[in-house]
Image (cartoon, rainbow, N blue to C red):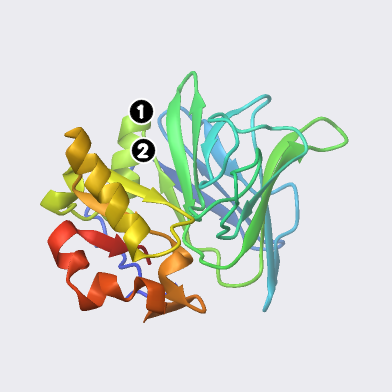
């Protein structure tokens, strides 16, 4: 992923002797592992399955402990703790109408947190290509997590934790903190799909006012678009821009 899209953190001044994680690799056939040097606990190990690196297909598998506690790989409608048997998590942005169980949703975040009795750690794959992450067991009953992506590189960041909050903070140091929301964003917002014209939107805003319910922003969905083209208003919504409803009532088309 280009650095002008996601900037990389500055190199750490921590020496390898003081690092909370250690990296080992085997040159031929190539594999690598990450462990905690103070305890020897292995957090990531690719030795069991050959790595595949082609122009439009990458595959990498790591061993996991039995019945692991895994979280993340959002955005999806699965339970908080991820299933670990015959499970596929697709990372491909998707507008899943009605949000059915097990669907990938609007965001793709190839990062997971694993919690163990000894502590928590995170693994972040900085790759924006579509991918499937498989979590399952081998025929011998060995637990694994496997990345299958359509391209890019294996640009991994390993987050030492050791607490869930520390993993989250370390992840934020890589990808950055969320932008500060505008002051008007703190108020009550109303949005729905299906408004037929600007008058219906204005009527809802008026009813909020009549009911004494503070309303900061009205959002419209794709209904306002001319042939679903961004920044082009259908004629029955044009009043929102031509007569100042956007400025007067904070009615905003959602993009």
Regarding mark 1 in the picture, which secondary structure is present there? loop
Residue displayed at 65% across by 41% down:
100
Residue displayed at 20% across by 65% down:
245
Say above or below: 67 vs 20.
above
- Using the numbered discs, state the Cα–Cα distance from disc 2 to disc 1 in whole angstroms: 6 Å
Q: CB of mark 2 within 8 Å of CB of mark 1?
A: yes
Residue placed under numbered mark 2 in the picture: 167
Residue displayed at 42% across by 77% down:
234
Q: Nearer the viewer, residue 241 or 222?
A: 241
Q: Position of residue 152 (x, y in %)?
A: 56, 72
Say above or below: 180 vs 169.
below
Q: Is residue 17 visible to the viewer in this orientation of the structure?
A: no
Residue placed under numbered mark 1 in the picture: 163
On screen, residue 45 versus residue 107, left or right, reads: right
Say above or below: 64 vs 151.
above
On screen, residue 47 versus residue 210, left or right, reads: right
Q: Position of residue 223 (x, y in %)?
A: 46, 65
Regarding mark 2 in the picture, which secondary structure is present there? helix
Quadrant the N terminus occupies: bottom left
């Amino acid at each position: 992923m280009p650095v002008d899209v996601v900037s990389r953190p500055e190199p750490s001044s921590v020496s390898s002797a003081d690092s909370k994680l250690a990296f080992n690799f085997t040159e031929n056939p190539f594999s690598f592992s990450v462990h905690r040097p103070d305890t020897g606990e292995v957090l990531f190990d690719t030795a069991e399955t050959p790595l595949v690196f082609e122009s439009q297909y990458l595959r990498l598998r790591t061993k996991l402990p039995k019945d692991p506690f895994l979280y993340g790989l959002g955005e999806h409608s699965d339970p908080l703790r991820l299933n670990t048997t015959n499970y596929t998590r697709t990372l491909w942005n998707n507008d899943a109408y009605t949000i059915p169980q097990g669907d990938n949703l609007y965001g793709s975040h190839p990062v997971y947190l694993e919690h163990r009795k000894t502590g928590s750690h995170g693994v972040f794959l900085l790759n924006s290509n579509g991918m499937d992450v498989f979590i399952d067991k081998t025929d011998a009953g060995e637990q694994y997590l496997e990345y299958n992506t359509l391209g890019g590189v294996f640009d991994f960041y390993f987050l030492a934790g050791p607490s869930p909050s520390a993993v989250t903070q370390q992840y934020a140091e890589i990808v950055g903190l969320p932008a500060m929301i505008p002051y008007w964003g703190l108020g009550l917002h109303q949005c729905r799909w299906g408004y037929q014209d600007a008058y219906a939107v204005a009527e809802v805003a008026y009813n909020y006012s009549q009911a004494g319910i503070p309303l900061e922003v009205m959002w419209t969905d794709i209904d306002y678009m001319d042939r679903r083209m961004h920044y082009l208003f259908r004629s029955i919504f044009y009043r929102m821009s031509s007569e100042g409803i956007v400025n007067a009532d904070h009615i905003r088309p959602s993009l």
